Image (tube, grey):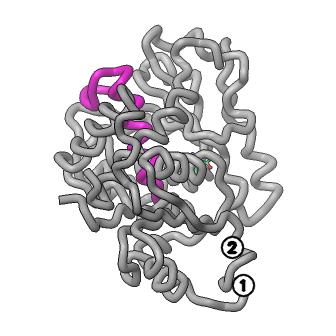
Amino acid sequence: MLKGRHLIEPGDLTLEELEEILSLADKIIVDPQSFYGVCRGKLLATLFFEPSTRTRLSFEAAMLRLGGKVLGFSDANATSTTKGESLADTIRTVSSYTDVIAMRNPKEGAALLASKYSLVPIINAGDGGHHHPTQTLTDLLTIRASKGGFEGHTIGFCGDLKFGRTVHSLAKALSRYKNNKFILISPPELGIPDYMISEVFEKNNIPYTINERLENVIGDLDILYMTRVQKERFFNEQDYIRLKDSYILNNEKLKLAKKNMIILHPLPRVNEISPEIDSDPRALYFKQVQYGMYARMALIAKLTGAL
Ligand code: NCD
C-alpha cells in the first residue's frame, strides 16, 4: 500500500512497490491525457531550498497534468526560514495545507527529518549529497525502456561520485537486481563514499571496480551514467576548478564504446558531455527528462491514494 507513504531513499520501496510505480508510469507514457483528473482536488507543495529546473518543474507539471494544483517556493529566502524558523515547523505548517510535499534541501537527512513532522507524504527531491529517489525512478524507466530490464548490466558511474546524490540512489536501486557489475570512474578525491561501498556493494556481494580513466573501461559498459562535478558542495573553489573538467565525453571516446551502450545524465550538464554527441542514438539524457514527469505523475498518484 503506497498511499500515505514517504519516499526518502530507494530502499523505502520494496521491489514490488517500485514495479507498481514504474508500470503505472509506463501506462501514463502511452496515454497521458487519460490520467487527467485523477488528482482533482489535491494539492502538491514544492519546497525547494536549493536551485532546480527539471525536478521542480516536472513535479509541478506532473501534478497539473493529473488535474491537481500546486503551491510552494523555489527560493527559501522569501520564507520564514530566514527568520529562523525550523524545518520541522515549516513542514508542520505546509503539511496542514496540502496533500503531498516534494522537498529539496542542501542538508543530508533533511527529508527524513521532515517526514517525522509531516501530516502528509514527503517526497525527497534531493537532500544534499545523499539521495534523490525520484531521479532514480526516471533513470530506471529509461533503462527499462531501452535495455528491457534491470539485470545483467555493467554500469559505469562517472564524475562526482562523492557528492552526486543521483549516483547514490541509482546504485542502491540497481544493486537489488541480479548479475549487475559496477565500475566507479572518478578522481580519487571524488570517489563514492565509504558507506556506499560497505553498505551497498560489499554487503550484497556486488562486484565493483574503481578506475580513474573513462577510456580504460568505456568499452565494457552497457550503461554509462555521467555526472556533473557538484560545485555547490565544494568548500574550496580551487579544488573545484582543478577537478571540474576531469571527464569530458566526446565522439572520440564514444568510438571505444559498445554500439548499444546507453548514456544517461541527470542534468544539468556543464562540460562533461560534449554537445556533439547529443544526436548519437545512445544519448538518452533528454529522454530521461521526458520520463521524469511521467515517473512523478505515477508516484504522486500512488502516494496520494488517487490510483
Ligand atoms: C541532479 C541533482 O539535483 O542532484 N539534478 C537533477 O535533479 N536532475 C544532478 C545535479 O544537480 O548535478
Residue sitting nearer the eye, 159 or 9: 9
**Amino acid at pointer 2:** Ala
Q: Quadrant of residue 13?
A: bottom left
At 26% across and 59% down in the image, what residue appears? Answer: 305
Q: Secondary structure at mark 1?
A: helix
Labelled pair 2, 1 in contact (Cβ < 8 Å): yes
At 28% across and 31% down in the image, what residue appears? Answer: 150
* Residue 202: mark in rendering: none
Mark 1 burial class by Cα count in 10 Å: few <14, some 14-19, many 20+: few
Q: Which residue is mark 1?
A: 82
The percent coordinates of residue 228 (x first, y second) are: 65, 43
**Amino acid at pointer 1:** Thr
- Is residue 236 at least partly visible in the picture? yes
**What are the residue bounds of the magenta stretch?**
131-154
The percent coordinates of residue 167 (x first, y second) are: 48, 46
Q: Secondary structure at mark 2?
A: helix
